[in-house]
Image (spheres, rainbow, N blue to C red):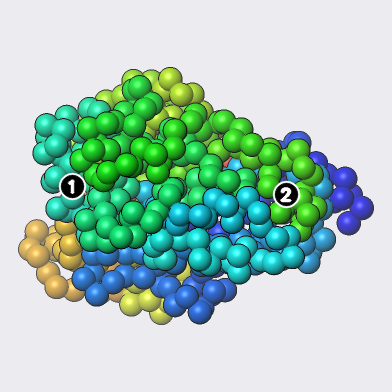
Amino acid sequence: MAERAARRCCLGWDFSTQQVKVVAVDAELSVFYEDSVQFDRDLVEFGTQGGVHVHKDGLTVTSPVLMWVQALDIILEKMKASGFDFSQVLALSGAGQQHGSVYWKTGASQVLTSLSPDLPLREQLQACFSISNCPVWMDSSTAAQCRQLEAAVGGAQALSRLTGSRAYERFTGNQIAKIYQQNPEAYSHTERISLVSSFAASLFLGSYSPVDYSDGSGMNLLQIQDKVWSQACLGACAPRLEEKLGRPVPSCSVVGPISSYFVQRYGFPPGCKVVAFTGDNPASLAGMRLEEGDIAVSLGTSDTLFLWLQEPTPALEGHIFCNPVDPQHYMALLCFKNGSLMREKIRDESASGSWSEFSKALQSTEMGNGGNLGFYFDVMEITPEIIGRHRFSAENREVSAFPREVEIRALIEGQFMAKKIHAEALGYRVMPKTKILATGGASHNRDILQRWGAVSSFSPRKPALYSSHGEQVQSYTQ
Ligand SMILES: Nc1ncnc2c1ncn2[C@@H]1O[C@H](COP(=O)(O)OP(=O)(O)O)[C@@H](O)[C@H]1O
Ligand SMILES: O=C(CO)[C@@H](O)[C@H](O)COP(=O)(O)O
């Protein structure tokens, strides 16, 4: 305990789809404290599944904002109970699931700046939001708003050149437009709109934290080259939007010292710096120290593929975001919605809910699956827009079912084949020195990673595959 008390550190937070996580990192970059609060397990009163509520239309997907606030209360109390020495925290920053948005009610900023250290955040912030269920990245209910936005700026290609992406249903500008159109009263009572990342930073700051360039690129609102809001896009989405968003800032900006609430309640030093929070994928690019030529695959709730780019190359598929490390550079990203939750479903149906049974099935089947192929999209996919389960036998006939081991391998090979095909179509190239770095919950599963390595090796140039802990899972030499 004495040693822990003397350890100066920085905290990293992650407000992701299924949980809030924290890590403490010391001066040698060693992680010496980790904790998490899982929404479904630890906050059952909110009744989420996978951290979200899927509405009756099957398209609208939201999360309760107070669940995120309470998760922060719980995790800080757990840290305090474990004897964590907050006085040694020099700075903190973090990440949030991308695209989700939080709507602060008029007067909320006053509450944020005058929080009482005697009460948890949840109790004090309950009346601070004009929308209690926040749209999140899994939402695909804004097709109409997407078409309106593209029409307003001269088409999908023009929007992509300007903001890095054609209109996507989960992107925040389209979500804001839907809220303005369907609930104008709530919109007019909103004084500030945050992303999940800048919302989390605002809690620590005790005032509104700006949106950073990198996460701001996932809104269909930011001109990614000039780093300013596009007036055409703002105007197409909702009135008086610029004042509700505030000015965007570089992702590495120090946005201020920690709020006195955390100093008094937990013992943080008053000088503890809050660095702008960003999106979880940009944060992974920074944290994995991705270099040019490397490809990262994040296997969180979503599966994403991303890489560092010098120059933006906007297209009709995939996204270009501002780079979180170097504001002159960019990152490219592909997002697949049917990631971990789809794997969990097949695990439950075909492997008795056990990852080790799932692994055994992968080990007992051959690469290529005897010619059987499967593509599994239980929810409307993002890349490409498709839904349903599609299985093909070795004779290329569509079939309705596979034996369980074949089903499991078809899922994993199909998921990674789709990633490879879409990535190559966008010009991602696996070079002899390419490292493929894997992160996210499913990257702990060596058997899944090994199949991914095998699918990558269909390429004539063969990469090495690493887990986020730097362990080489598979190496292919020429
Ligand atoms: N051993 C494992 N094998 C495969 N998937 C796993 C394993 N452990 C965890 N996962 C998956 O990781 C997912 C959560 O990943 P995580 O990166 O924590 O998500 P998020 O950050 O989006 O909340 C779960 O949905 C789960 O399916
Ligand atoms: O929509 C995207 C990226 O564009 C998702 O990747 C979200 O950022 C959610 O991330 P995870 O919770 O799956 O890590």
| Label 2 residue SS | helix
Give how far across and how far down residue 50 sits, in percent: 42, 68
| Mark 2 vs 1, N-terminal side | 1
Determine if residue 162 is in view: yes
In which image quadrant can residue 413 be found? bottom left
Q: Nearer the viewer, mark 2 or mark 1?
A: 2
Residue 442 higher or lower than 160, as above or below: below
Is the CB atom of the residue marked by disc 1 within 8 angstroms of ligand 2's nearest atom? no
* Amino acid type of the residue tagged 1 in the rendering: Cys
Left or right: 92 in relation to 213: right
Give the amino acid type for the residue marked by disc 2 in the picture. Ser
- Toward the viewer: 69 or 366? 69
Q: Which residue is mark 1?
A: 146
Crowdedness of circle 1 by 10 Å Cα count: few (<14), some, many (20+)? many
Query: Residue 90 versus residue 287: which sits nearer the camera?
Result: 90
* Residue 193 % position (x, y): 41, 48
Numbered badge on residue 260: 2
Relative side of 466 to 314, left or right: right
Q: Residue at x 66, y 43 (%)?
A: 92
